Image (cartoon, rainbow, N blue to C red):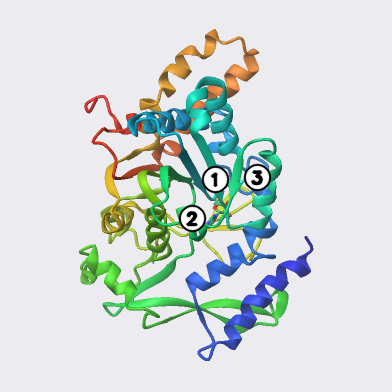
Amino acid sequence: MSNDTQFTLANLIKQQIRQNPRQRITFAEFMEMALYHPELGYYSSRAGNLGKEGDFFTSVHLGADFGEMIANQLLEMWEILQRPANFTLVEIGAGQGLLALDILKYLQAKHEDCFAATKYTIIEQSPKLQREQQQRLQGWSVTWCDLGEIPENSLVGCIFSNELVDALPVHQFAIASGEVQEIFVSVRENPGVKGGFEFVEVMDDPSTPELVNYLQSFGFDISNFPDGYRSEINLAARDWLGNVSRCLQQGYVITIDYGYPGHRYYNPRRTTGTLQCYFRHQRHNNPYINVGYQDITSHVNFTALEKWGEQYQLQTLGFTQQALFLMALGLGDRLVQLPYTNLPTMEVLQRRDYLQQLIDPMGLGGFGVLIQGKNVPNQLPTGLKQPSNP
Ligand SMILES: C[S@@+](CC[C@H](N)C(=O)[O-])C[C@H]1O[C@@H](n2cnc3c(N)ncnc32)[C@H](O)[C@@H]1O
């Protein structure tokens, strides 16, 4: 893609701002366009850039083990639900389709009865990634649709995602003179910069009372936040979770992502929020450069997902770290058995490295795993069982 195209997306956002009577848009609107504009957003146009060669990689890029251990968790859920003849797996935000392929291959090879009952559906916002998924999953029985198309209370199964919620557009706020102010995005002409303009932040009263309501509903006393404190609020996650629950008649929701419980997320000492951008494996915090060329994410407040879930009849079954989740699902045994496989030495070393990355507490192992259930029997999924909680 040429630089001209890059400036086209920035120009489109500029136009949107100029059309607004107040010459500004919310940060959530900016992030929505930067990531999901149907032709020029990061996920629409630069989708090929996920993975080891791209801007960032996720657990699914570290071999098939991650998907296989998740498949084992899904298999157990199928058994807990008394082996339903139609067991629907819905993956939301499936990226390049790697996790889907690993899960389906494993179930077909090792658990044919569960595989025969499984209906795999993908919900994917990016048309380009959807095409890539369709190519990768050719020959497998997978369907694609919008979440809104799934009829109410129609599914028995599991709805799951890996690094989806961190990619939903967030509002940003800051504390000024003890009050919550929203951070909006505006433009300033500047002949000294490429393109002749730059995006600038302006603060004003929030565009919606939901921002203050959100902080109050989690019991945060705004007066504890120092002036200049800033952070993010993911209201889109609430609507997403409501929609997810609406589809489920009986089953589970597994959400894997980086994030914290609310009290850590909104710790008054974390004064600069959690917003991060990824550009060619470099992490920085300026969302106003490389527009359409870089990923923008913010950590997930898992307490919010738990609380909203309960409002939508999703019971929190447990929250754990990815390292503990995968260890409970047999990652330790996989490490021990590695030297006894017939793989060439270099492959053994690479797989060991990948398995260790999946549980590295400073990296992917520190991710959160939340499992919620709707109308499910009272049995803890194995991924949530810890040595002290068998
Ligand atoms: C960070 S990527 C993660 C991809 C993949 N799950 C992985 O682990 O590699 C986020 C994915 O979510 C998709 N996405 C974002 N918002 C979405 C939404 N509202 N509905 C469906 N997919 C969405 C993106 O297009 C992309 O495929």
Spot occupied by residue 323 in the image (x, y as percentages of width and height): 39, 32
**Does the beta carbon at disc 1 come under 8 Å from ligand 1?**
no
How many angstroms separate mark 2 from mark 1 (CA)?
10 Å
- Note whether 98 is above or below 263 in the view shown: above
- Note whether 121 is above or below 23 in the view shown: above
Residue 217's label in the rendered image is none
Q: Secondary structure at mark 1?
A: strand
**Earlier residue among tags 3 and 1:** 1
Residues under numbered marks 2 and 1 in contact, where contact means CB atoms less than 8 Å apart: yes
- Note whether 99 is above or below 232 in the view shown: above
Which numbered mark, 2 or 1, is in the foreground of this view? 2
Which residue in the protein does label 3 denote?
133
View extreme (front): residue: 85
Which residue in the protein does label 1 denote?
121
Spot occupied by residue 221 in the image (x, y as percentages of width and height): 20, 68
**Earlier residue among tags 2 and 1:** 1
Residues under numbered marks 3 and 2 in contact, where contact means CB atoms less than 8 Å apart: no
Which residue in the protein does label 2 denote?
150
**Does the beta carbon at disc 2 come under 8 Å from ligand 1?**
no
How many angstroms separate mark 3 from mark 1 (CA)?
11 Å
| Residue depicted at 63% across the width and 44% down the height | 96
